[in-house]
Image (cartoon, rainbow, N blue to C red):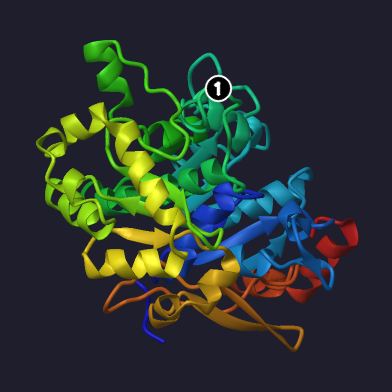
Amino acid sequence: MSAGPLSGYRVIELGQLIAGPFTGSMLGYFGAEVIKIEPPKGGDPIRQWRVVEDGTSLWWHSIARNKKSVTIDLKTSEGVALVKQLIDTADVVIENFRPGVVEKWGLGPDEFKQSNPKLVYARISGYGQTGPNASKAGFASVCEGYSGFRYVNGHPGEAPVRPNLSIGDTIAGIHATLGVTMALLEREKSGSGQVVDVALFEAMFNLLEAVVPEYSGAGVVREPSGTTVTGIVPTNTYVCADGKYVVIGGNGDSIFVRLMEAAERPDMAHDQRLANNTGRVAHEGEIDVALASWCLQHDSEVILDKLAAARVPAGPIFSVKDMMADEHYKARGLFERVEINGKPLDIPAIIPKLQRTPGQTRWSGPELGEHNEEVLGDILGLSEGALAELRDKGVM
């Protein structure tokens, strides 16, 4: 196994559930040593989320891969002291508690300005560390709405929809990973660490493309548009004769000509009213009716074959079952197999793919407290007697 690009960096993960732990996962994918601090009783609640087999969430084996689990009770003075010592040896801290919580424990970033001035301290919360909403509880579902992201999703006149995923947490984790790596790069120049402040709502706000300038410059409020995207035609989802859906993106001028010829509508392909996007937007309904009618006459495989031959961007809508049977997914190596209690389990492969120093799964999610002795003994130098005393007190 090659050393990852983040090999040699030590990360202390104080987070739980999704946003903070996903940041730790991303850093761990690429070689960082990630030490996850968990409460001794039960550990991170995500160990019991969603589908559970043999007492542990199947998701845990993926999101906690490459991490070292250390159990420490942060409600005890001894536990806080241990974590302080670990942070003094670290390059990065990740926390995703409500602002002020880690300060109450005595583990906020200001505590380490003297003892570890190079520390990069990533803080993930619903609304950020400052501002009137900073102290509010902020799960991804709520912050996706506050960000404006939910407003533009769904069908006009209906309740906004959410993907069946905690996308706000994951996007915030990606932003935090980016912030941490930039802070580590900057540290090479300045010699100093800094705080990386990531708000869930801001991470989702960062996805809104032209929404703000269109409103500021033209007073246009982007509204939900169902299965289309406002102002780009044609791009839509269509049902086929076999009941399956296909997505077609024919909004380039030359692509539109090829699309409509493939759809057996040469009259529309060469209609000068539709020669550019402005004209197509004005006649969106007419174009959608033609494409919907064509798709209903053929099975999805036929539609996709015809569009592939015409070099028109189009594709199916996959379930996870479809993904795992797909040859391109397999060729790209998008699944890794680990063994859990003697049984195989497929988990997502690591992305992005680096040519020389790719990420890798060194081990799947650890047992609770699996690395107590390794971390507290080897890194902090605690003796077997000291570790036994901490166990007896319930500190670990």
State the residue in front, 239 or 211.
239
Q: Residue at x 30, y 67 (%)?
A: 306
Label count reads 1
Q: Residues within 10 Å of mark 1 (few under 14, many from 20)?
A: some
Q: Indicate the position of residue 236 as horizontal and vertical percent values.
A: 38, 44
Q: Is residue 217 above or below residue 248?
A: above
Please provide percent x and percent y for residue 87.
Answer: 54, 53
The one of 87 and 328 positioned closer to us in this rendering: 328
Left or right: where 179 falls relative to 14: left
Q: Residue furthest right?
A: 392
- Which residue bears the numbered disc 1? 134
Image quadrant in which the N terminus is located:
bottom left
Secondary structure beneath dot 1 equals loop
**Which of these two is toward me, 184 or 85?**
184
Relative to residue 216, is residue 142 depicted above or below? Answer: below
Instruction: Please state which amino acid type lies under the numbered disc 1.
Output: Ala
Which quadrant of the structure image shows residue 209?
A: top left
- Compared to 339, does 197 lie above or below? above
- Residue 42: percent from left, percent from top: 82, 57
- Residue drawn at the location 74% of the way across and 71% of the way down: 367
Residue 46 coordinates in the image, percent (x, y): 72, 55
